Amino acid sequence: GLFLLRHSSRFALYREPGESGYDPTDPAYAKHFSSCVSANGTAIPCTMTPGNSYVECEEDGCTTLEKCADEQSQRDCAALALQAERKECFDKVKWCRKYTIKTVPKDATVGMIPSHLHCIDALGDVSQTPGAIVKPGTDEMGNCYYNDGQTTVNRTKTGDYAFCGGEECEGTFVGAFGQLDFDPRYRGWYETTKAMQKNNWSPPVLLLQSYQ
C-alpha cells in the first residue's frame, strides 16, 4: 500500500506499506524500522515517542469487522417482530474494522512505519535535485536540506523504498528529509466521523508544517 498526499504547504508524504497492524517480529518489516533519518541525515531507528497513540490490530491485521458505533448499526435488529423489518434493519448495518487505540508506555521501544517528508519541485514531484526544490511557503527555488538546514539530502535507496506516484515508480527513494508518526485513526476528527457514519465537518485542523 501507499499513502501519498500533496497540498498547498508543498510537502509530499509517502508511507509504506500504509497500514498499521504489522507484526514487529516479522523480518519483512525490519527495513522500515531503520528507514528514518535524524536532523542531519544520519540513519536512526523508527520508534514512537512514549505517550503517543498508536493503533493495535488483532492477529489478522485489522481485517476483523465489528458493527460501527452509529445508532442504526447498533440497533437490535433481531428483536424486531416482522421479518421485513428485521431485513431492512440488517441491510442498514454498517461494519467497521476492529482495532484498539493504545498509548506507548514510558521507557518502551515501539517501532513504527513512518510517513516521510519529502522535498518537491515546481511540478509537485518528489526531488532532491540541487536548485530545483521549492522552498516551503515561498515560490523560490533552492536545495533539499535535512532539518538542520545545512546538510544536503542525497538519499538513493532503491527497490522496496522506491518512490511511487500513481502507477509509476521512479526507482529511487529520494528527497526524504524527515518523517512523521501519523495514523488518522486516532485523530479526533476521524474518530468522530467514524462514529457518526455520515459526512461531517470537523473544526479547522492546524497543519504543523505551515501553521495554517
Image (cartoon, rainbow, N blue to C red):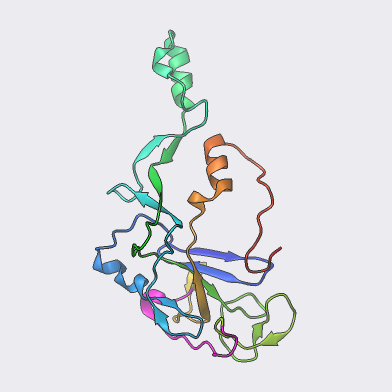
Residue name at image x 61 percent, y 71 percent: 11
Name the quarter where the N terminus is drawn.
bottom left
Q: Quadrant of residue 196?
A: top right
Position of residue 67 relative to residue 86, above or below, is: below
Q: Name the residue located 34 percent from the left edge and 42 percent from the top edge.
A: 64
In the picture provided, is 104 more to the left or to the right than 128? left
Q: Where's residue 147, x and y in %?
A: 56, 81
- Magenta residues span 148-163
Q: Nearer the viewer, residue 196 or 148?
A: 148
Q: Is residue 124 above or below residue 51?
A: below
Where is residue 83 drawn, in percent x and y? 42, 12
The secondary structure making up most of the magenta span is loop
Q: Position of residue 178 (x, y in %)?
A: 51, 76
Q: Nearer the viewer, residue 169 or 109?
A: 109
Q: Residue 25's quadrant in the figure? A: bottom left
Q: Residue at position x 46%, y 57% from top? A: 52
The residue at the point 40 percent across, 63 percent down is 17
Q: Is-magenta flag for residue 197?
A: no
Q: Residue at the top extreme?
A: 81
| Magenta run includes residue 159 | yes
